[in-house]
Image (cartoon, rainbow, N blue to C red):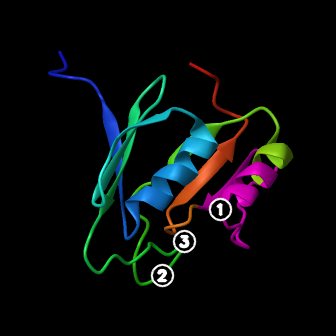
Amino acid sequence: MAIGYLASVVLDCDDPGALADFWVQVVGGEIAFRTDEFVAIKTGHIWLATFRVSNYQPPAWPKGQVPKQLHLDVSVTDLDKAQNQALAFGARLPADQPSPDRWRVLLDPAGHPFCLSIQIPEI
């Protein structure tokens, strides 16, 4: 028996406000709490937070000095449309795309990899 449930995912970064604003545009929700050091986003399914860390170094994807620590998967119905919207919000598209017909790897403004995927059913 579980002792709890997954309540939040927190992303380290150097600018919590800007990163939270980006993620609100990508996954929706609303800013529930904001300071210069921490921002919490309430979504319909889970909380997502951004947290300032000193000397933040973004992960390198797919290989590099700073390995990927985690990534988020965002379920979408149209990869091209979702990719274009995410890019307009400030995401970046890395050259390495392992399976672009099923998912697209993008980098958020702080360098965290995330995937847009048509393979994950909505909850």
7 left or right of 118?
Answer: left
Q: Amino acid at mark 3?
A: Trp
Numbered disc in front, either 1 or 2: 1
* x then y, percent, for residue 39: 35, 49
In primary-sequence order, the first of circles 1 and 3 is: 3
Q: Which residue is mark 3?
A: 61
Element under disc 2? loop
Q: Amino acid at mark 1?
A: Ala
Element under disc 3? loop
Element under disc 1? loop
Residue 87 within the magenta-colored segment of the rendering: yes
Give me the residue at 57% from left, 61% from top.
Answer: 108
109 left or right of 53?
Answer: right
State the separation of the CA atoms marked 1 and 2.
19 Å
- In the image, 20 versus 117, the foreground residue is 20
Q: Residues within 10 Å of mark 1 (few under 14, many from 20)?
A: many
In primary-sequence order, the first of circles 1 and 2 is: 2
Image: magenta residue range: 84-107
State the separation of the CA atoms marked 1 and 3.
14 Å
Numbered disc in front, either 1 or 3: 1
CB of mark 2 within 8 Å of CB of mark 3?
yes
As displayed, is residue 106 above or below residue 115? Answer: below
| Image quadrant where one finds the C terminus | top right
Q: Which residue is mark 1?
A: 91
Note whether residue 116 is visible. yes
Give me the residue at 47% from left, 51% from top.
Answer: 20
Q: Which residue is mark 2?
A: 64
* x then y, percent, for residue 113: 54, 61
Q: Residues within 10 Å of mark 3 (few under 14, many from 20)?
A: some
| Image quadrant where one finds the N terminus | top left
Q: Amino acid at mark 2?
A: Gly
Note whether residue 71 is visible. no
